[in-house]
Image: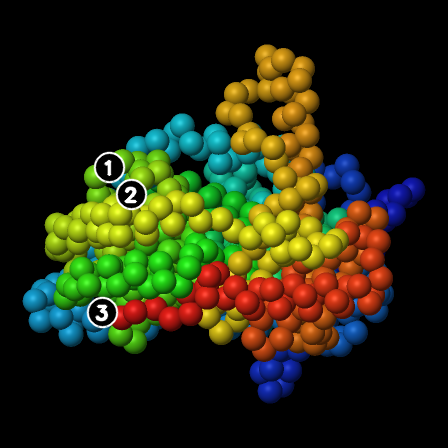
Amino acid sequence: MLLRLFTSDTQYPDIQIHYGTLSDGGVRQNLQVIDFIRHPSQSVSNYWSIIFVAVHICVPSYTMDKNICSSKSEVDMLCNAESDVDSFIDNNAIMTTGAVARILKESESMKSTQLQVDENVAQSSRSLLSEDSSSSKSSIKAATCSTSEDPCWTNDLLHIFVLSEAGKPIYSRYGNESDLSSIMSVMQALVSFVANSGDELQLINTTDKKFLFVCRSHLILVAFSPISEPTSHLLICLEYVYNQIISSLTLQRVEKQFTRHANLDLRKLLVGDNRLLSSIINRVEETFGVFLNAISCTPLSENNRAAISQIICQNAKLRGLVFGILFHKDDIVSIVRMKDQHLSPSDIHVLLNLIGSSQSFKSAQSHWLPICLPKFDANGFLYASVTYLNDTTFMVLLTVDSEKFYPLKSITEKVFTLLNTTNNGNHLSAIMSSKFPQISDIGIKNLRHFVYKSIPIGQYIASEWTVPYAIAYELSKESPVGMDPERKTKLLNDNVVNKLRHNVLLSYKRLHMRLHSSAIPTRFIYKVTSTELFFGWKTDNFELYATLEPLITITELGEIRKQLLKWIESKKTQFFILSSPTF
């Protein structure tokens, strides 16, 4: 089905609408494509209206098409992974495991009333985050939009919208969500119209942009990005935004509130949480761990890590304590856990996002707050004791018992004391002096950067940035206005370096998408540009992504990846936590 809209003198850029198709057996097939065009001068609201008209005309007469992407251009090749949307959603669904309730029942000293979710618990837990929300809001939201006609949100930045099934605005990454309510209403109309025909709207592609739609438990999440952004990673971003909302409220509470009030304004329950949503999007965009679904560990010798874990394990014996984690920056030093209980990488990223979103946590005192970890149990709260040892090292103890603040604070103090005194404080010194691998230490010619993931344990290691991706000094908080010319030149150079880093990260994401595509299974893939060579390599046990000098032969590429893999394998006990002690 092809629909083209013309004026008397202009043919406009193509827009493609992708939506799921169901066979008689209920099995989702490849996505159908509908093309139509618009005038580039159309306003944002009219743009969405044209899309709605096209869907209204075309959807009732769609047919299945298994050959969506016939072109082999780089952008078209991205389409090969679009049919993985459903499998990704199934594999990354939140879990209503009932783990919190089960652990509570097993702990004899706890009250049964703790099984019920307090309606005000999520709001009170965000008091720390709301203290400085007004000052930080402008720093996280890098652009503002006064109205839906303002084109600023149509630039090359990733934009995220969240709205209710009734079309109520909940969140907009850039600008005020209330000012963009008319656009969100059109989004809701699009989703509802396709749903009424027995299907699900998933993706809209234009020549240079794409819109991704995900529906979750009374919520509609929309990502708007350049066409080059891998669709699978837009899905990851929307999943993390949804997980962050569930982390604040629990799935049970979201469903309960919307069942009672279909027109509920969820913003009233998410007081202060815009910061968390914006920062989780930044984390998705800027870190390797999110798209790899893995965590990073502080490099330590096996003996040092074992000694630190033993200190925590021996002192963290308390009924109802589920996890004890020592972090250095965003990397795990040690994790001890209750038997048969595990934390997924995505839950750890949500936890780190909560802690990293407020400077208040870095005060000397311990902090106590409830948090729902959607993969661990989407319907229950854990209670986190967060205490910083110094500016970069902190302990998180997670329990199901809301009355254990002081016992957990005492445990943390004992652990910190022992870290400072045991073996003359060498264990703590090892944490503070730990470094990620330097390319110069590896001794492999033409290698610039690498990221390695160990699949069985869900952990990754990345090398430090080197030339040309290295920044000589930390970016100054000082405004560029008024800087002397030399300092201003350095700042601009650093901005260029950040763009180079972003290009490396985006290239890894594209390679990752291709390696994980069920449509075209691939084990090894590389890409050469005028400035770099990128490759991705996947087996059952690991994934390896690397950036090399561009002028190398295929033979040299093969030797480099073998040497690099051998070097990483020799350092596994230093880079990874191969086993975690239990209480």
Looking at the rendered structure, which numbered label has been put on residue 364? 1
Residue extending furthest toward the left? 109
- The amino acid type of the residue labelled 2 equals Tyr
Coordinates of residue 523 in the picture (x, y in percent):
69, 74
- The amino acid type of the residue labelled 3 equals Phe
Quadrant holding the N terminus:
bottom right
- The amino acid type of the residue labelled 1 equals Ala
Label 1 sits on a secondary structure element that is loop
Seen at 36% across and 65% down, the residue is 343
Residue extending furthest toward the bottom? 25
Residue extending furthest toward the front? 424
Q: Earlier in the sequence, mark 1 or mark 2?
A: 1
Front residue of 426/128: it is 426
Coordinates of residue 296 in the picture (x, y in percent):
47, 57
Q: Earlier in the sequence, mark 3 or mark 2?
A: 2
Q: Residues within 10 Å of mark 2 (few under 14, many from 20)?
A: many
| Mark 3 → mark 2, Cα distance in angstroms | 22 Å
| Mark 1 → mark 2, Cα distance in angstroms | 6 Å
Front residue of 299/519: it is 299
Location of mark 2 (residue): 388
